Image (tube, rainbow, N blue to C red):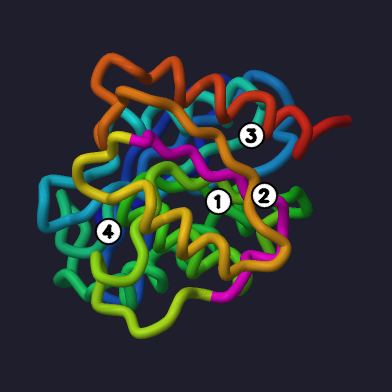
């Protein structure tokens, strides 16, 4: 495979392709300057509505994980950018996420896993979390129910889980997320803000403030 991704050095980033079930998966990998304390995989918003790994919320989540000395992978779901395949309504995208997790673990073995995602990507990360054995899950504006072609919610991630949501979200109603999350036991942690809408335009500081304390606690020591 041409342009195959290779692990960059400390403090460096690299982009390239890894093999996936639907063909190549395009990834961007950032390594901390220090020895990695964990690995993180961050999932992007809906592929059919312009979502890609370059999304600013995804970038912010990845940046927060890198500051916590995690090796961080962002990637494009199948059919986005140079990733091969076609949109699969979270099913194939979950396989893509798990494939990236497996690749990261082969490159940085023996460390804990963070999964994170925004919107559609938050749902995919939730679907993958229990299968992947994540130690922490960060969800920004996760959609449930009527927003996706799903008949039931994914299983509990089996790890500490924090949700960030704006009360005035104009795409994924805050009340719908509250209702869906209430079905989980133990319940996720919540960080609720006002005025950020769905896309967090001009409000990336809210994403950082929700993420960093959670990451410090999850990857302490």
Q: Which residues are magenta?
A: 155-167
Q: CA distance from mark 3 to mark 1?
A: 11 Å
Across and down, in percent, residue 137 comes to 60, 50
Residue 191 drawn above or below residue 155: above
> What residue appears at the point 60 percent right and 44 percent down from the top-left corner?
162
Q: Element at badge 3?
A: strand
Q: Nearer the viewer, residue 96 or 175?
A: 175
162 inside magenta stretch: yes
Q: Which residue is mark 2?
A: 136
Residue 77 has which mark?
4
| Residue labelled with disc 3 | 70
Kindly indicate whether the residue at mark 1 contacts the one at mark 2 (C-beta within 8 angstroms). Answer: yes
**Distance in Å between CA atoms under marks 4 and 1:** 15 Å
For marks 4 and 2, give the CA distance.
21 Å
Asked whether the residues under the numbered discs 3 and 1 touch, taking CB atoms below 8 Å apart as contact, a structural biologist would say no
Is residue 152 shown left or right of residue 34?
Answer: left
Q: Nearer the viewer, mark 4 or mark 1?
A: 1
Of the two numbered discs 3 and 2 on the same chain, state the one appearing first in sequence. 3
Q: Position of residue 106 (x, y in %)?
A: 62, 58
Which numbered disc, 4 or 2, marks the residue that appears first in the sequence?
4
Mark 2 crowd level (few <14, some 14–19, many ≥20, 10 Å Cα):
many
Q: Which residue is mark 1?
A: 115
Q: Residue at x 36, y 54 (%)?
A: 121
Dot 1: what SS?
A: strand
């Amino acid at each position: 495979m041409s342009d195959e991704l290779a692990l960059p050095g400390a403090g460096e980033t690299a982009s390239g392709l890894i093999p996936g079930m639907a063909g190549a998966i395009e990834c961007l990998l950032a390594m901390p300057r220090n020895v990695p304390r964990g690995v993180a995989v961050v999932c992007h918003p809906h592929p059919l509505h312009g979502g890609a790994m370059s999304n600013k919320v995804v970038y912010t989540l990845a940046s927060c994980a890198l500051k916590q000395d995690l090796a961080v992978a962002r990637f494009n779901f199948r059919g986005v950018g140079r990733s091969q395949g076609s949109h699969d309504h979270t099913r194939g995208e979950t396989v893509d996420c798990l494939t990236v997790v497996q690749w990261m673990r082969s490159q940085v073995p023996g460390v804990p896993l963070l999964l994170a995602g925004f919107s559609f990507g938050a749902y995919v990360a939730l679907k993958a979390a229990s299968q992947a054995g994540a130690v922490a899950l960060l969800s920004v504006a996760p959609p449930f129910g009527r927003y996706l072609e799903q008949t039931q919610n994914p299983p509990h991630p089996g790890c500490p889980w924090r949700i960030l949501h704006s009360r005035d979200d104009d795409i994924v109603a805050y009340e719908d997320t509250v209702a869906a999350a209430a079905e989980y036991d133990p319940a996720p942690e919540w960080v609720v803000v006002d005025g950020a809408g769905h896309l967090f335009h001009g409000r990336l500081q809210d994403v950082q403030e929700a993420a960093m304390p959670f990451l410090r606690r999850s990857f302490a020591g």
